[in-house]
Amino acid sequence: MAVSKVIYGQNTLIDLTNDTVTADKVLSGYTGHDASGQAFEGTYVPSEGGGSLEEKAVNFYDYDGELLYAYTAQEFLALNAFPTNPTHEGLTAQGWNWSLSDAKTYVASYGMLDIGQSYTTDDGKTRLHISFPQDSLESYWTMSINFTASVNGAVTIEWGDNSTTTSSGTNSKEYTHTYAAPGDYTISLYVANGTISFGTNIIGSNYNIRGFRPKIKEVNIGNNTKISGAVFQYCNGLERISLPYGLTTIGGQNVFTSSNLKALVLPNGFTGFTGNTIFSSCYNLKVLCLPNTITSTPSTFLSSCNGLKSLIIPSSVTSISISLAPNVYSLDRLSIPSSVTQTSSNMASYAKFKKVVYKSTCTPDFSNCKYIEEFDFPYGTTVVGGFYQCSSLKRVSIPSTVTEIASSAFSSCFSLCTPVYIGANVQSIGGSAFQNCYSLPAIYLYATTPPTLGTKVFSNTGNTANPFKIIVPHGYLSVYQNDTNWSAYASRIVEMPA
């Protein structure tokens, strides 16, 4: 018999009679009780199985960028297993590119994550899906492939029209084939021994005379295949790439400059890139899933990838090089973990995120990020800076571990409208640190020894309607007002109450 209300003496211990919870509102695998006290099993599966899903804190993507599952952080942390792997004809799903335990640890700390599915081909062959438009000239029906085989005669090229070619030599070589008619073809490369490596210009020199590169639509990397160099540079028709477990590195520069590439899932076990400028002008790249095995990001990791909305750096990463994501305008969420000990000097200029999760103690550089509204420097940070011309920044939190406010740290942060609290350990405030902070009402200083000041630190700070104040520890008013550095601001200095 179901019980919905329990009264002991004059006290109501349990009352479910006004509850509105139903089975479709409770996560699958969990038990609830309705208003009558009747127990039921939850039937809610969060955003599962395609359809018009909306991205949430934790998102699961297919290799082509399709959103398959989406969870709030709380929903994800309640899972006991990953959701079901997707299926595709000709591909074998290998699993998600994070382990469940690592993913839960990350989400518990940072509240967000993007996870992707990895694939190998069902026969181990590497495939290139190409298309010759029906209205194309006959002179366009020639295809070239450029690769290096480690073993002479070990690679068989199946051109997709019942024609084959056997590789020769162990140097970089271009193999050419002419088709009898336009249409869609799948080229397969079978590696019997050793490895093959795609270096610069996977399509060889053919694109120079016939503009062929845009005709590649999809690439599926199979067994014993390496990627190095500008493999897919200017392959503007390329939309999808599947990468398998076992691919641990990608070498070269300008590897992906494919304007129609929609997504990339780097597999679990991938450790990093050996070149720089990896993604350049990938204007339609919307999904990038990095595994928790990559250890660093190269210089100019993402450049002008205007469609990318989320960049989540795994906790395996220890260093972020010079330019992480310049001119990635659509970026609206960014997570930098505490594991990062070296960070970028051009973190994500002009990105649209309003708030980032940043737990590295390295000084960030978010200069010119016009949309960021608030920022909390993590405990352990010693130098604060990097928010020059962040015109929407309204609030900033500075921990007590900080010893220096860098030059131009918050210069021209016009919207900074809440007091800034600077701890007792600060020893210096650099030039123009708060210059042109028109809306800033006050800074609170807890150092009993006045920090050294650069020039124009508080130039044009505050306004007539909102006079700017410098609030110092009780009993130290005269110490600040008479200090060589601070005497110019004596009229603005007041002391804290006793």
Image: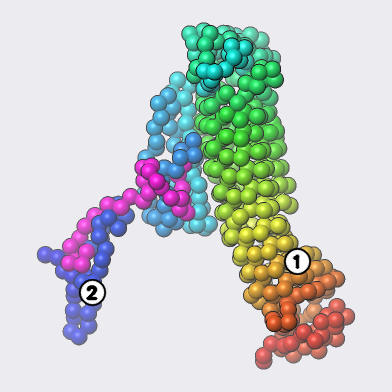
Range of magenta residues: 34-61
Q: Is residue 424 visible?
A: no
Check disc 2 and report the residue beneath it.
Answer: 14
The percent position of residue 268, horizontal first and vertical second, equals: 52, 38
Say which quarter of the image contains residue 177: top right
Q: How far apart are the two marked residues, 1 and 2, measured between alpha carbons?
A: 56 Å
In the image as oriented, which residue stretches furthest toward the left?
Answer: 1
Front: mark 1 or 2: 1
Say which quarter of the image contains residue 373: bottom right
Q: Residues within 10 Å of mark 2 (few under 14, many from 20)?
A: few
Residue name at image x 79 percent, y 80 percent: 449
Which residue type carries mark 2? Ile
Q: Give the left or right position of residue 93, taking residue 460 as reference.
A: left
- Would you say residue 428 sits in the magenta stretch? no
Q: Is residue 369 above or below residue 135?
A: below
In the image as oriented, which residue stretches furthest toward the front?
Answer: 135
Decide which of 433, 473 is in the foreground and name it: 433
Decide which of 315, 332 is in the foreground and name it: 332
